[in-house]
Amino acid sequence: MFSAPATSMSQLPLTVTEFIDIGDLAPLGPNIMSNVTDVREITQNCTSAKSVTDQRLLGSESPKSFLDLDTVNEQDISLYDHTVNIKEEKMYVNCVSEQLSPTFQYPYDYSLLQTDNYQPPSSPEEYHDIKTEHPEPDLSETIVRALKREINEVCKTLEIQQDPMSWSVEDARKWLMWHLGHDYQTSQGVLEQFNFKGSELCALTADEFQMKSLELGKNLHAQLDVWKNACKLCGPVIQQTTQTYDPCQMFNVINESYTVWPNPSVSPTPSISSDDSSSSNNMYSSSDDERLSIYSHLANSQITPHQRRSSESHQKQTIHLWEFLKELLLQPENYSNCIKWIDRERGVFKIEDSSRVARLWGRRKNRPAMNYDKLSRSIRQYYKKNIIRKTENSKRLVYQFCVPYL
DNA sequence: GATTAGGAATAAC
DNA sequence: GTTATTCCTAATC
């Protein structure tokens, strides 16, 4: 996935905002949502992502607009990836771009962003040197909670201990795989360079990580650093379990920590195809489909035949629109600003931000050209199938799930 | 101007 | 074959 990037520091014209996806930030709490507005000023210095200078950045709308990835000028950024990691009070946004970088970490420095003369650091080293003091006292707790959930679920899924010092070589490989998760070739290449048990992995410096993988080394080191620090913060609460490998658990991990993912235990999944098995959990996105595929490949020798069949049977599934809408509705803490229940009992919901819902859907289905016009056409296809209908007193952007799909 | 409705062709699975 | 996407016209809010 990551093509050979240039490493020149001069190729750092973009500021952090171009890569922040509000969908990733939202689960971390309202404090972040409110503070991202402060990034607005520094985006004006951005020279490459032209669209960040449009009116959506200039205060007319909520932060979500200018933080959505579709504001990125893809002519300038032909390939990007992004993740958000939290370490104590510092947020790192890892950016990967063909033109920009290998993997750099941009601390999301609230105190600096609120100053008038903020200048983005010109090199990754400067970013690392930034000291952050977050003004919101509640953020640390939010971050710790999010980390706790994620680490707990990842430990369950990978069947590893939370303490990396106790990891075997195989445990460490699982963890690396989890964080690599982009494509099998890349992951295998990197894994060959990190054939260590946990204690040895923890002893490696950032530079040593980078020496072993120019593109991903520092990112992995940061991920491990975050993990180690989070374990300290989380203390003994996190418990490693003996739960068997279940791809659905991966959904829950992502569901709580990154973006919109389904939770099959929450939403009923009525059969709308002739194959019940294919309709029950057809909920992988491309990225985690890949991640699961890679992990499955790695773990094939350790999972049971039943589990392997389960994994394989889930990888080819696709999510239906009505399921996706329900996922959003089931996370009001994150998405009530774009879709929410009007009458939960009767399945009546309203799309508050049609373009955002469409973008989320398009991203999920890897359809960049998705818009509300197309999304709504798909919804209307549900009328005949009695999955979704308009309410009796039809109102704009208000729909209703039919009884079996409530 | 945005939304709604639905036909038709096509793509994706 | 089913579902979703894309494009379209027309009507409505």
Image (cartoon, coloured by chain):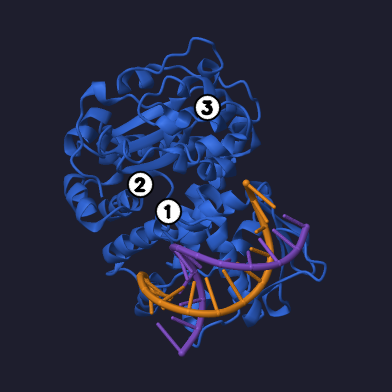
Chain colours: A blue, B orange, C purple
Image quadrant assignment for residue A29: top right
In the drawing, what numbered circle is on residue A368? Answer: 1
Residue A266's disc number? none
Disc 1 versus disc 2: nearer the observer:
1
Residue linked to disc 3: A89
Give the distance between the C-alpha atoms of the residues marked 1 and 2, in whole angstroms: 43 Å
User: Mark 2 falls on what kind of element?
Assistant: helix
Label 3 near label 1: C-beta < 8 Å?
no
Amino acid on which disc 1 is placed? Pro
Q: Nearer the viewer, mark 3 or mark 2?
A: 3
Where is residue A333? Give x, y as percent.
67, 48
- Hey, what amino acid is under mark 3? Glu
Q: Secondary structure at mark 1?
A: loop
**CA gap, disc 1 and disc 3:** 33 Å
- Residue A166's disc is 2
Chain letter of disc 1 in the image: A
